[in-house]
């Protein structure tokens, strides 16, 4: 029998972190299922879903917690079963001059509409010609299949106008 677990990892970035984590999983007879990892502000930040044989979970947890000896703050939790059907999902692409409040405005709209942000990847980069800071984001938003989503595209467009953003919205066929 297998147990699904979620690990989070944070610490100063250096070569070998992913290798160390994957070795822990392999040594436990586990399987690396999904992950998202980034270099942020000089740190390595990651989240990983693994499955480990149930009888090896206690030792695996201990070894993950011992990663603090390598300068990594790690947590481990049981994964939850999720619904097979997330409902209605949309992919948003956001691009515009960086300014405070962009993420709040988008996430507030999603919450007010009863949605859930399932993925949010963003960056701030220099524009090629002007050098000004551009905010870019790719967002996956899902709503209960009974949620009325008419009008959301219009409201996103209004937020885009207010914050000088290009916001594209399309169905995400998972």
Image: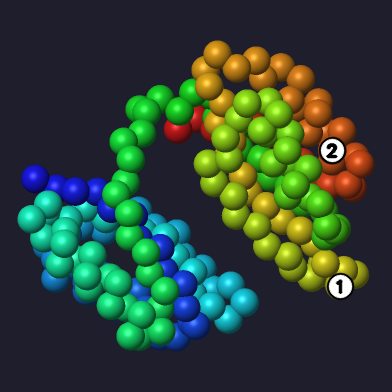
Mark 2 lies on a secondary structure that is helix
- The answer to whether residue 19 is seen in the rendering is no
- The answer to whether residue 51 is seen in the rendering is yes
Q: Position of residue 24 (x, y in %)?
A: 22, 71
Q: Which mark is residue 19?
A: none
- Which quadrant would the N terminus be assigned to in this image? top left
- How many numbered marks does the figure carry? 2
Q: Residue at label 2?
A: 159
Task: Relative to 68, say whether 165 is above or below.
Answer: above
Mark 2 neighbour density, 10 Å: few (under 14) some (14–19) many (20 or more): some
Residue sitting nearer the eye, 74 or 95: 74
The residue positioned 38% from the left and 69% from the top of the image is 74
User: Which mark is nearer the camera, 1 or 2?
Assistant: 2
Task: Relative to 137, say whether 23 is above or below.
Answer: below
Task: Relative to 99, say whether 149 is above or below.
Answer: above
Horizontal side, residue 111 vs residue 127: left or right: left
Q: Position of residue 125 (x, y in %)?
A: 74, 68
Dividing the picture into quadrants, the one containing residue 174 is: top left
Q: Position of residue 108 (x, y in %)?
A: 73, 38
Q: Residue at label 1?
A: 131
The residue positioned 22% from the left and 73% from the top of the image is 63
The residue positioned 53% from the left and 41% from the top of the image is 118
Mark 1 lies on a secondary structure that is loop
Q: Position of residue 82 (x, y in %)?
A: 36, 34
Mark closest to the chain's N terminus, 1 or 2: 1
Horizontal side, residue 107 vs residue 26: left or right: right
Dividing the picture into quadrants, the one containing residue 132 is: bottom right
């Amino acid at each position: 029998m297998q147990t699904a677990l979620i690990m989070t990892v944070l610490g100063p970035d250096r070569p070998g972190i992913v290798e160390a984590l994957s070795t822990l999983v392999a040594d436990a007879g586990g399987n690396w299922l999904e992950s998202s990892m980034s270099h942020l502000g000089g740190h390595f930040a990651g989240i990983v879903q693994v499955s480990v044989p149930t009888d090896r979970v206690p030792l695996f947890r201990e070894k993950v917690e011992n990663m603090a000896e390598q300068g990594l703050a790690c947590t481990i939790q049981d994964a939850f079963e999720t619904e097979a059907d997330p409902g209605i999902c949309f992919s948003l692409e956001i691009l515009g001059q960086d300014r405070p409040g962009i993420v709040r405005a988008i996430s507030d709209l999603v919450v007010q509409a009863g949605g859930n942000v399932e993925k949010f990847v963003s960056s701030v980069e220099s524009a090629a010609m002007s050098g000004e800071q551009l905010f870019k984001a790719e967002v996956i938003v899902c709503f209960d299949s009974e949620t009325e989503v008419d009008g959301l595209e219009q409201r996103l467009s209004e937020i885009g106008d207010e914050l000088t953003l290009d916001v594209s919205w399309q169905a995400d066929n998972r």
